[in-house]
Amino acid sequence: MNINNKVLHIVCGANETELWIITAYYPNNIKWKDDLKTRKEKN
């Protein structure tokens, strides 16, 4: 998701009738590559 040109990661769960939002956060470049979609490898 992109809000005001900032990427927002949303973790959710769902079944046939319900949707749960678990957490939402702005990713940083320490754990995520420049595209903010790909997690960096652990060293």
Image: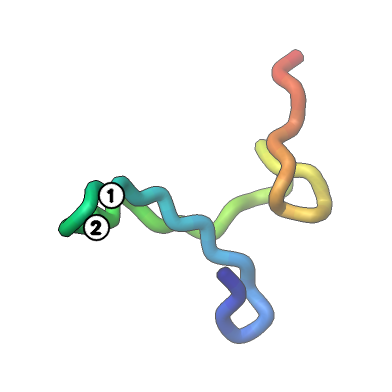
Residue 35: x and y in percent read 80, 54
Q: Secondary structure at mark 2?
A: strand
Residue beneath disc 2: 19
Q: Please, is residue 24 above or below residue 5 in the view?
A: above
Residue beneath disc 1: 14
Quick one: 31 or 13, which is closer to the camera?
13
Looking at this view, name the residue that lies furthest to the top.
43
Amino acid at the residue labelled 2: Leu
* Residue at point 28%, 49% (across, down): 14
* Residue at point 56%, 80% (across, down): 3
Residue 32: x and y in percent read 71, 42
Q: Secondary structure at mark 1?
A: strand
* Alpha-carbon span between mark 2 and mark 1: 4 Å
Q: Please, is residue 4 above or below residue 36 in the view?
A: below
Amino acid at the residue labelled 1: Ala
Residue 15: x and y in percent read 24, 47
Mark 2–mark 1 CB contact (< 8 Å): yes
* Residue at point 68%, 80% (across, down): 5
Crowdedness near tag 2: few (<14), some (14–19) or many (≥20) residues, C-alpha within 10 Å? few
* Residue at point 24%, 57% (across, down): 19
Left/right placement of residue 19 relative to residue 24 reads left
